[in-house]
Amino acid sequence: MNTPKKFFIQTFGCQMNVYDGQRLAALLESRGLTPTANVADADVILLNTCAVREKATNKVYSALGRIRRAKRPDALMGIVGCVARESGADAFKRVPDLNFVLGPQSYHKLPEILDNPDTKLLNIDLGGLEKFDALPPMTRSPAVAYIPIQEGCDHCCTYCIVPYTRGREISRAPVDIMNDVHHAAQTGAVEICFLGQNVNGYKYQDENGTVHRLSELIRDTAKIDAIQRIRFTSSYPTEMTDDLIDIFRTEPKLLPFLNMPIQSGSENVLTRMNRPYSLDLYIDIVDKLKAARPDIQISSDFIVGFPGETDADFDQTMAVAQRVGYINSYCFKYSPRPHTAAAVMPNQIPEQIKSLRLVTLDAALNEIQRTFNLSCVGRTLDCLLEGADKTGRHLVYRTPYMQQTIVDAPAGDTPPTLARIKITDANKASLRGEFVA
């Protein structure tokens, strides 16, 4: 009897990439392959990639170098996703061993190389929504099901490569989205996370001229008994419409947590980033959200060292971080990306200044996060099981604010997927807790 072939997937980047990795795995499993964590055992090796920063692209090519030394000579190896779209045919020049290079909207073409392993396959077309119809359904959903509701982005921030790697913004039909939601609920999902590069800008006009929005998707999803938690990421400030703010007030299944990147606290920098909102508008949206849902907490993304950023600009970023009190944020040094306007802007910031600003902002954000985590001690929160820790002695749960919460694994019992957990201790990175009967 032939031994089933095996595949290895390594995923880099955002939650959209996590979803892509899950669908790639389902595609390969539908063709009889089984997953392996060992590159040397794999017949098919995929790197599912992110190109949002230069460091992310470099990580992919470093990983390819390690994999080339470990893989079997006859194994098929390729990259899919944003680095594939960014690199195109040059990827074959950089890594001659590659068998396929597939963009984020063409990875459903993978069977072509499986059926013709002696060829090279390059497809980085921006085909829109074709992949959603072409991919086989997942037979088992994870507890947290990521559901893309759109592809691409129209905002064209001057630092961002996403419009190049994923194309212009296209919203999926609500019937297709809700079919995915129902399938996820029927196959194990407890939480739905709606995904999009500009997720709250979701807008679909049907044949009758009716416009469907994200708030409608949330309301329809909340009616499904199996789904207990709903969230969405990542949001654009000017797309935070009143109907969406109001649903935080009215829908308890919608988590009191929102990622709404500001990127910079300086309006001068925001203008050069082509992010057309004022600081007053952003703060007004935060205030409206907190009025609608007093327990809501906000996270953000920040870029430091954007071309032309002065010390005064950076001080304004520090001030807005304290003003909003972001509980969980990511900050990055600006890195020039190909196909973006900021890459050729004057007044590029020296690396040492970017590094110093990153350390300074990181320290402030970590302290804000630590303070919020400590404020949770003594509270009892409804938490979702993520899995066991590396030791196997503890379980990891996620609070409604996405905090990692560590509890002792119950002896001999199957742990609950959803649990009420009393928070007993905290640090800047995580919480400790105990089950409440």
Image: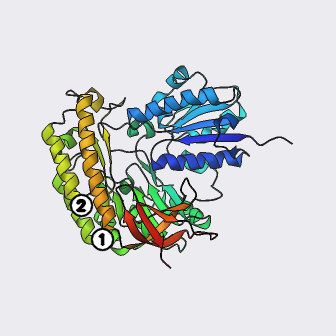
- Numbered tag placed on residue 274 in the rendering: none
Instruction: Find residue 293 and name its label.
Output: 1
Mark linked to residue 285? 2
Give residue 247's quadrant in the image.
bottom left
**Residue 88 coordinates in the image, percent (x, y):** 50, 27
Which amino acid type corresponds to the residue marked 1 in the rendered image?
A: Arg
Residue sitting nearer the eye, 262 or 295:
295
Left or right: 176 with respect to 251? right
Q: For residue 73, say whether it is visible.
A: yes
Residue at point 35%, 75% (across, down): 250
* Local secondary structure at mark 2: helix
On the question of residue 211 being in view, the answer is no
Instruction: Name the residue furthest right.
Output: 1
Query: Residue 215, percent across and down?
Result: 38, 65
Q: Nearer the viewer, residue 371 or 40?
A: 371
**Tags 1 and 2 touching, CB below 8 Å:** no
N-terminal-most mark, 1 or 2: 2
The outermost residue toward the bottom is 437
Residue 140: quarter of image: bottom right
Residue 305 falls left or right of residue 90: left
Q: Alpha-carbon neighbours of circle 2 within 10 Å: few (<14), some, or many (≥20)?
A: some
- Viewer-side residue, 8 vs 407: 407
- Left or right: 1 with respect to 300? right
Question: What distance separates the C-alpha of mark 1 from that of mark 2?
Answer: 12 Å
Q: Is residue 120 above or below residue 252?
A: above
Residue drawn at x 30%, y 29% is 343
Q: Residue furthest left?
A: 312
Is disc 1 placed on a helix, strand or loop? Answer: loop
Q: Nearer the viewer, residue 3 or 195?
A: 3
Q: Residues within 10 Å of mark 1 (few under 14, many from 20)?
A: many
x 40%, y 69%: residue: 423
- Which amino acid is tagged 2? Ile
